[in-house]
Image (cartoon, helix red, strand yellow):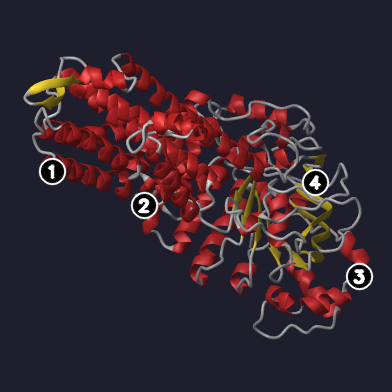
Amino acid sequence: MKKPASSAVGAGGCDIQARGIHYHIAAVSSRPHPPLKVWSRPDDQAVHVHDEHHPGHGQRQVLRNVTCRARPGELLAIVGPSGAGKSTLLEILAGRLSPSPPFAPDLLLLNGAAARSADLRCVSGYVTQRDVLFPLLTVRETLLFSARLRLGAGGLVVDLPARVDALLDDLTLRRVASTRIKDLSGGERRRVSIGVEAVHDPPVLILDEPTSGLDSASALQIVGALRAMAETRGRTVLLSIHQPGARIVKMFDSVLLLAAGSVVHHGTVDQLRSLLADAGLDLPPHVDPVEFAIDSVDALRVHHSPQAQSHPPPPPSSRDREGGRCTLQQLFQLHSNSKQKQVADEDSAAVDVATGSQRYANSRAREVAVLSQRFFKNVARTRQLFACRTVCMLVAGLALGSIFYDLGEDKVAERVGLFAFLLTFLLSSTTEALPIFLQEREILAKETSSGAYRVSSYAVANAVVFLPFQLALAVVFAAPVYWLTGLRRTAPAFGYFLLVIWLILYTANSVVVCFAAAAPDFVVGNAAIQGVMGSFFLFSGYFITRSAMPGCWVFMHYLSLFKWPFEALLVNEFAGGGRCVVRALGQCVATGDQVLRREGLGEECRWRNVGVMVAFMAAYRVLGYAVLRVRCSLALNRAAAGPPGLCLSRRRLMRGTRSSSSM
């Protein structure tokens, strides 16, 4: 026997409704795909059509006049055959998509008041079919970082670890709390994904096929945890599911059956049995009605009249039967009586969706701090990104040092060749970080679409975290190369050499970040990086001097990432001291300063080139941020107007149209 939602310990859901929703897309594009368009994936080419009445030729209507309602403390299951429109409906209810025209002010409602997609994103946690998680973080770390980003430092929540521990118990993840995500089973990863979206106590929890790919025991465990969340915390839970088992069906409060984008049934499981009987469909023994209804959906569509499909009756609410109502104080489980009274008073007001509040839970500085800590853990635990690269840099440094061992004063060409090779090696050996950044981009899009943090905070944290790692790699590489090859043996010269190596590594990292933000996949990104780096090396001045270049290509000489560190290393090695670099018949023909001046170089280039390298690093970082910002904005461009993270006050969104009943 299920407990009534009104008696739950910590009710706090939202009544969410959809009225007459339509959604259609272009089924076939009449324009040929450009053969050279490689910077977007094929699934990004769908054109979302917005006509005024009906979709035209070549358009597929995904949803047709869908009306549904989900109440606090209840679990609504959206079922139907593949292609019925379940995922699209969930995305609209989660604020990730906006319905197609014609628009109406009351298409989407929260607690009886008209709501925008931004409002829906604010009150809902959306769990996609794919588990988008950092594989090297533990379960506890994943949930704790999510809580710190979504809840902030202040406010009503003080003890975040205690909240995470409680969630671990709710999702039966305590046993694997210290296990890394990559070592979890499929069911455990799915429960972690649910926990990431539930840790900040959203009033509405929406899940797209949370049981897909799982065995029956894992599926039952996940639905049971969701059922418990709806009962004990009063959340509004919506999920789509394929062929649920009989034990899972018993946990549903109501069922929404879709077929070809239309509503066939919206009500309780008992009402679904009655619908099957009215349609002349006899339920076979030992078959649950939901599975049988999905198999018999064509017959039900014939039986179901268009009038009934347009406005299906909403399922009875246990909350309405009990006369209770969820309160924000129960959602957050406040222990202070004064705070409970204050929140209860606020909840008694009507919904106000016109006034906004703070856009993000944390300040920009705190977002950078939390993201930097998470970045640091990921980079330190990623072997190919730090551990293996450290070993490779040390081996490369020792190898170069032994090959160019103890270069004499007259080995000028060998020194120049050494500088050219180490630049090529350092600037072209960072593409192993590209898959890591591509994976992080997917997580970034998911988290920023939920308003967890700003894209700029992510970009700053990414830039800050790699500074010490690149410095460590620079030391490991520069020390053996410099002292074994016998370069200028002074502490200032070595310090400058180390600084240039550090800047080279960080510049290469910035280039990878920039291309990872723009490239659709590893193959395209890797090819683009290699091509750009090759062209930069060609125009560096090592193979052909600037004066010998055609005028139309001189600009590439100044854009080359090889030019500036190459010149800086030459100045550091040959400028000053009157070092002889060219001898004839035992006489010094030219000193280092003379040769450098002949090429337009001198001491003034030492710090100028460092400044140019820093400018290039900043430019690539800013460009990468701009691309990420555009990508994250495009991820929400199908939703209603409102910037990512723009959320109305949770208290305002939780207010109902009725006064809260007495506790």
CA separation, marks 3 and 4? 24 Å
CA separation, marks 2 and 4? 39 Å
Q: Is residue 84 left or right of residue 234?
A: right
For residue 68, the mark is none
Residue hosting label 1: 403
Query: Can the viewer see residue 430 in this picture?
Result: yes
- CB under 8 Å between discs 2 and 4: no
Coordinates of residue 475 in the picture (x, y in percent): 21, 32
Residue hosting label 4: 108
Mark found first going from the N terminus, 2 or 4: 4
SS at badge 3: loop
Residue at (44, 38) in percent of width and height = 511
Mark found first going from the N terminus, 3 or 4: 4
CA separation, marks 3 and 1? 84 Å
Amino acid beneath label 4? Leu
Q: Which image quadrant is residue 353 in?
A: top right
- CB under 8 Å between discs 3 and 1: no
Residue hosting label 2: 180
Q: How many marks?
A: 4
Mark found first going from the N terminus, 2 or 3: 2
